[in-house]
Image (tube, helix red, strand yellow):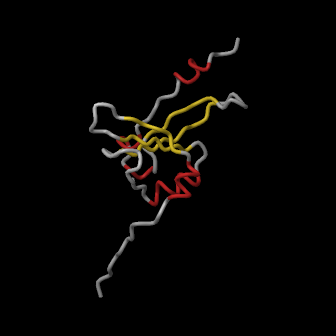
């Protein structure tokens, strides 16, 4: 007898990795889904970006998040906006759109003592 998708997924715990491990993993949440083609359970790496402004408000991603986005299959960014309103909204942003519009904006400077 074939297990239902729900019972297979219930055995997996959703992990709030940014709370459990800090920001080093490059995503906030590790979840799981069922691959429609293979019927395998696959990880889903979720990064959440939040702003109080509307959908057009710029947001930041770290270099680590950017690298994880490029290297991990099933990496998604959920954009939460209008957070301080009575009607906050969210949308899943396609990775291709992020990569087309990402602009480097931070530099790390380490001075050595001499």
Q: Residue at x 72, y 31 (%)?
A: 38
Judge from the rendering whether residue 51 lies leftward or rightward of residue 100; answer left or right: left
| Rendered image quadrant of residue 100 | bottom right
> Which residue is painted at 33% across and 40% down in the image?
82
Q: Residue furthest right?
A: 37
Query: What residue is shown at x 41% (from left), y 49% (from top)?
Result: 56
Disc tally is 0
Residue at 47% x, 54% y is 65
Closer to the camera in the image, 50 or 22: 50
Quadrant showing the N terminus: top right
> Is 93 situated left or right of 105 in this image?
right
Which percent across, then down, holds residue 75?
55, 44
- Quadrant (top left, top right, bottom left, bottom right) of the C terminus: bottom left
Q: In the drawing, does residue 58 fall left or right of residue 33? A: left
| Residue 95 place in picture, x, y as percent | 56, 49
Where is residue 10 shown, x and y percent of the image?
A: 52, 21
């Amino acid at each position: 007898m074939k297990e239902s998708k729900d019972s297979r997924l219930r055995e997996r715990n959703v992990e709030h990795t940014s709370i459990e491990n800090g920001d080093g993993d490059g995503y906030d949440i590790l979840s799981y889904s069922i691959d429609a083609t293979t019927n395998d359970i696959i990880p889903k790496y979720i990064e959440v970006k939040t702003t109080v402004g509307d959908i057009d408000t710029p947001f930041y991603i770290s270099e680590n998040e950017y690298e994880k986005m490029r290297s991990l299959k099933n990496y998604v960014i959920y954009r939460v906006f209008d957070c301080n309103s009575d009607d906050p909204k969210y949308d899943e942003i396609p990775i291709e759109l992020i990569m087309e519009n990402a602009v480097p904006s931070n530099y790390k400077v380490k001075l050595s003592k001499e």
